[in-house]
Image (cartoon, rainbow, N blue to C red):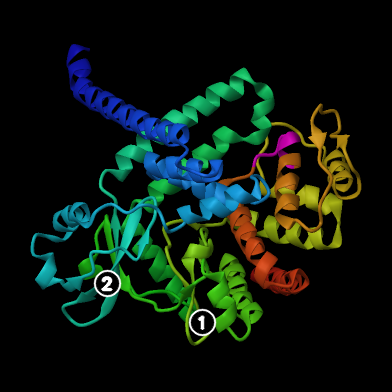
Amino acid sequence: MFPKVYKALPSAVVMGVKTLNRARQTAVALSKTGLDWALGNESSPQVLMRKTFERLGATYIKLGQLVASSPSMFPPEYVREFHKCLDRTDPVPFHQMHKVLKSELGPGYLGEIFADIDPAPIASASIAQVYAATLTTGERVVIKIQRPGVRTVLSTDLNFLYYSAVVLERLVPRLRHISLAGILSEIRRTVFEECDFVKEAENLQIFSDFLKATENDRVVTPKVFPQASSRRVLTMERLYGIPLTDREQFLKSTPNPQMTLGAAFETWLSSIADCELFHADLHAGNLMIMPDGRVGFIDFGIVGRISERTRKGVMAMIQAMMTKDYLTIAESMLVIGMTRKKVDTIRLAADLQKFYDAGETSLSGEDFPLRAADMDEPEQMLLEMVRIAEVHGIRFPREFTLLLKQFLYFDSYSDILFDMDLLMDEMMLNVEGLNRKLEWLE
């Protein structure tokens, strides 16, 4: 017994020290925010909040990205401000990133692998920073370098936030409908996947092979250079174009923006059926519009792999949503989701219909408000439908939440770039085609 205790003691002590150190860092960041507020250095609360999240580091930047990608859940001024968390966070000095490169690629990385590296990052996000460079063989590349100590920060913060949410939901049962603990659990799982650049390189190769197999020349992914990559360093071909974060420039320089992003949406939807994975993080910072009109998909740190059962359920649900077949929507939700109790699909269908047709009311047998559907806000509609299903006891798997998040990303682009009817027509054609393909496979 005692040897086991002593063997476990060092790791426990190390974890305690890391937690205390992180608590100290958090206190310092919050004190700086308090000082800025007291001195009136910031003009708006959303700017102050965004800077606080950036000071707190990777975990809170990820939460900021959640705010930026959830226009139906947060006020528009916060959504706009937190878009800066997508790829414009405060950078770590290059001398710290140099230590990561030296540790991962060897002390002679500059000269043996890279001819030169620009020390000013071209993008700075929560987990990594991206630098322009040239290989000794002449290729122009970008280097994605993981921030020092990011895994420790993520582990400490996310564990604390997750268990706090669990306790809060037990103390206030009505908060369970928000699924805060579930959201944090999902963030915890996906961000640790993002920390493994070897896995990301594999994801890139799989998607690139899918594009070749389907003869898709409208979307492109960067080539990976394995000799210049590792678990914390990923070197890729540099793609030149306009990131979708610069929407004004995109609209000015692109002859047919609807067709361009329509190709991106069609490719993504096709990957659900024809590829073993789909890109699950195509926010505006991860889409690049090339000069020749192609769309670059970058950053494959978060991907989804969907089961045949979930795929069929999703396709059936999308088709039923377009025809307002509420019973089929309810049955599809049951196919996609998981539940520990018997679900009355007729009651669920009735509540879905109320959501579409009625104003303020209550769910069947539940003291929980049902919000009226706003057909001009598709992301609100989808999120509300998921919430209704959860009230009936259905919990959706990770794959479905990733699909839903990605659809919301595309919908956020449609507000500015798409005719929504065109998007829905494109989606309907793809759904019908995928259903025929699935029937043929059976």
Label 2, label 1: how far apart the Cα atoms are: 22 Å
* Quarter location, residue 132: bottom left
Q: Is residue 254 above or below residue 210?
A: below
Q: Is residue 333 left or right of residue 14?
A: right
Percent from the top left, x then y, of residue 75? 65, 46
Q: Is residue 156 left or right of residue 168?
A: left
Is residue 21 visible in the rendered structure shown here? yes
Front residue of this view, candidates 352 and 396? 352
- Report the residue marked by disc 1: 294
Residue type, label 1: Arg
Tell me which segment is drawn in magenta. Answer: 389-395
Q: Looking at the image, which residue is at 55% across and 83% down?
A: 253
Q: Is residue 335 left or right of residue 95?
A: right
Q: Is residue 215 above or below residue 123?
A: below
Q: Is residue 347 above or below residue 106?
A: above
Classify the position of the C terminus by image quarter: bottom right
Numbered circle sitting on residue 225: 2
Is 391 magenta? The answer is yes
Q: Is residue 138 left or right of residue 250?
A: left
Is 104 magenta? The answer is no
Q: Looking at the image, which residue is at 29% across and 74% down?
A: 141
Q: Which mark sits nearer the N-terminus, 2 or 1?
A: 2
